Image: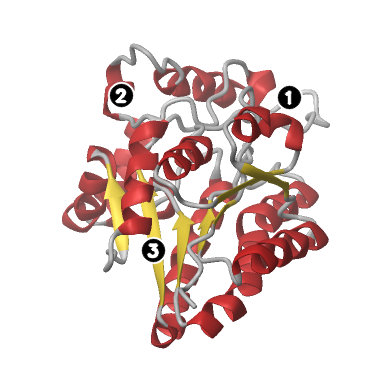
Amino acid sequence: MNPSNAVLITGISSVSGLSSGTGRALAFRLHRAGWPVYASGRSLEGLGDLAEAGITTLRVDMTDEESMIAAVQRITAEHGAVGVLVNNAAYSLNGTIEQSPMDEVRRQFETNVFGLSRMTQLVLPGMREQRSGRIVIMSSIFGLFATPGRGYYEATKHALEAIGDSLRLEVRRFGIRVVIIEPSPILGGFVPTTVGDLGLAPDSTVDDPYGDFWERFVVWHGAYREVEHPKGRGRLSLRSGDVAALLEKAITVRNPRIRYRLGIPVRLLRPQRVIFGERAWEKFVRTFFPTP
């Protein structure tokens, strides 16, 4: 019996959702190439266009273990195992370290880290049994350093870097490959248009010490909002199709890289930090990114 090549993609949001659309673009690419694709998201209503194209859609909430178990059981029943898991589910919590409510911080980690970890645990027994499998982890340029206002989100991406490295060493003997994807900023991904879009908790004080920072935060991210004709910093950003093409390569090549870094910013910033030293690097971050 040949190993399963069924692909489970998590975290495909609705078309109107605040996401880059990478998971959706990947689902279409793999489906056209003949792969059995299972596209999952928190609501089936947002996956209608995928279903119409003939792609199997599943309701999977990364904070609901029962939905994750059901998805893996269905794929296992139909294909013997999940052959490829693309851990794409994530969202960005905006807020300072001081003011972010801890229940929101926990929810951020539940989706971006704990849900991903549990889904990975669920697919591994089937992959081990068939002595084959591939697990793709979507990290970020912000898995390499942190900026003001998104520290908890960036902490989850740092965590995925460690989880991916540890997992890769643990499962290689079983024929399972683990790949970490580090894209530069993606146009349209988690980009607010107003301070209200940030989803910040209402401030309990009259004078918010970070109030003016959020105005600059929104303006700064505007460079990544315009998808068709980006300007300034946005010109170095990626489109969802670019990332989906790289993901397809990471899934289909026989011997994938440990990490795939996509875009000029992520390729430059990692060595720059080493060359600059920590104080000069922090000065760069304070200068380039909006800071309170």
Q: Are marks 1 and 2 in contact (CB under 8 Å)?
A: no
- From this viewpoint, which residue is outermost toward the top? 229
Q: Amino acid at mark 1?
A: Asp
Decide which of tag 2 and tag 3 comes sooner along the chain.
3
Foreground tag (1 vs 2): 2
Q: Residues within 10 Å of mark 3 (few under 14, many from 20)?
A: many
- Cα gap from disc 3 to disc 1, whole angstroms: 45 Å
- Where does label 2 land, which residue? 233
Q: Position of residue 13 (x, y in %)?
A: 63, 35
Q: Position of residue 37 (x, y in %)?
A: 55, 49
Decide which of tag 3 and tag 1 comes sooner along the chain.
3
Residue 203 picture quarter: top right
The label on residue 207 is: 1
Judge left or right: residue 249 versus residue 41: left
Decide which of tag 1 and tag 2 comes sooner along the chain.
1
Q: Residue at x 42, y 23 (%)?
A: 224
Q: Residue at x 70, y 41 (%)?
A: 99
Judge left or right: residue 179 versus residue 58: left
- Cα gap from disc 2 to disc 3, whole angstroms: 28 Å
Q: Residues within 10 Å of mark 1 (few under 14, many from 20)?
A: few
Q: Above or below — where is 246 with respect to 212? A: below
Foreground tag (2 vs 3): 3
The label on residue 4 is: none
Residue 226 picture quarter: top left
Judge left or right: residue 206 versus residue 54: right
Numbered circles on residues, count: 3
- Where does label 3 land, which residue? 179
Q: Amino acid at mark 3?
A: Val
Q: Position of residue 284 (x, y in %)?
A: 29, 40
Q: Amino acid at mark 2?
A: Arg
Q: Residues within 10 Å of mark 2 (few under 14, many from 20)?
A: some
- Cα gap from disc 1 to disc 2, whole angstroms: 32 Å
